[in-house]
Image: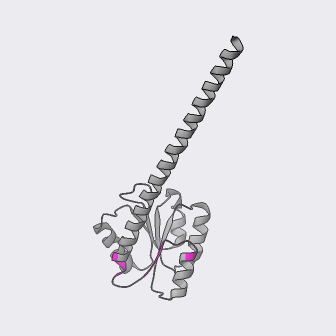
């Protein structure tokens, strides 16, 4: 994520009322780095900004939410997708999650809170990934340094043995 504390979030929502509800709730929970779009086509025009999270409906104007996710993931695999949908079919949610969505939330009165919880989980998992990466990088640097030291010692000992 760009900045773990305040990730860049794109929201694709065609309902003005629901958009206002989600934006207000996210902002009241300190997620203010938001860009809102009416449909996937508008969002694609700004995708170069590399959002951390895209929140979208399964049924969007034009391209379906699933098609949109699959299209964007080909080029921007780091983006997490959270689906917000009125469609409560379990098989739909399972299918979307298997294809790479981070979460699937049914639009109801608890959806805004579940959305915040989902974003928090994504932030925490990103922190853990960064820690694991830093550790692995540290181990790699250690072994490269050790290898170089061994090579230098070997070179110096061979060089001095040849000169004597």
Q: In this view, does 154 lie above or below 120?
A: above
- Figure quadrant of the C terminus: top right
Q: Position of residue 41 (x, y in %)?
A: 55, 70
- Residue drawn at (35%, 57%) of the image: 5
Q: In this view, does 103 lie to the left or right of 5?
A: right
Q: Is residue 164 left or right of residue 51?
A: right
In the image, 29 versus 16, the foreground residue is 29
Q: Is residue 96 above or below residue 162?
A: below
Q: Is residue 109 above or below residue 120?
A: below
In the image, 159 versus 43, the foreground residue is 159
Rendering quarter of residue 28: bottom left
- The boundaries of the magenta stretch are 98-113
- Residue drawn at (60%, 35%) of the image: 147
- Residue drawn at (55%, 43%) of the image: 140
Q: Does the magenta stretch include residue 141?
A: no
In the image, 126 versus 131, the foreground residue is 131
Q: Is residue 159 above or below residue 54?
A: above
């Amino acid at each position: 994520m760009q900045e773990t504390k305040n990730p860049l979030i794109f929201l694709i929502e065609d309902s003005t009322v629901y958009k206002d509800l989600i934006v207000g709730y996210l902002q009241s929970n300190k997620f203010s780095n938001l860009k809102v779009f009416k449909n996937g086509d508008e969002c694609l025009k700004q995708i170069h900004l590399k959002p951390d999270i895209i929140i979208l409906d399964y049924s969007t104007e034009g391209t379906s939410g699933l098609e949109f996710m699959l299209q964007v993931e080909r080029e921007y695999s780091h983006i997490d997708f959270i689906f917000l949908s009125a469609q409560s079919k379990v098989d739909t949610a399972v299918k979307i999650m298997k294809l790479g969505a981070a979460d699937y939330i049914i639009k109801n009165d608890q959806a805004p809170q579940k959305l915040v919880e989902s974003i928090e989980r994504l932030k925490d998992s990103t922190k853990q990934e960064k820690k694991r990466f830093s550790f692995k990088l540290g181990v790699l640097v250690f072994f490269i340094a050790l290898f170089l030291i061994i090579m230098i010692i070997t070179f110096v000992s061979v060089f001095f043995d040849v000169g004597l």
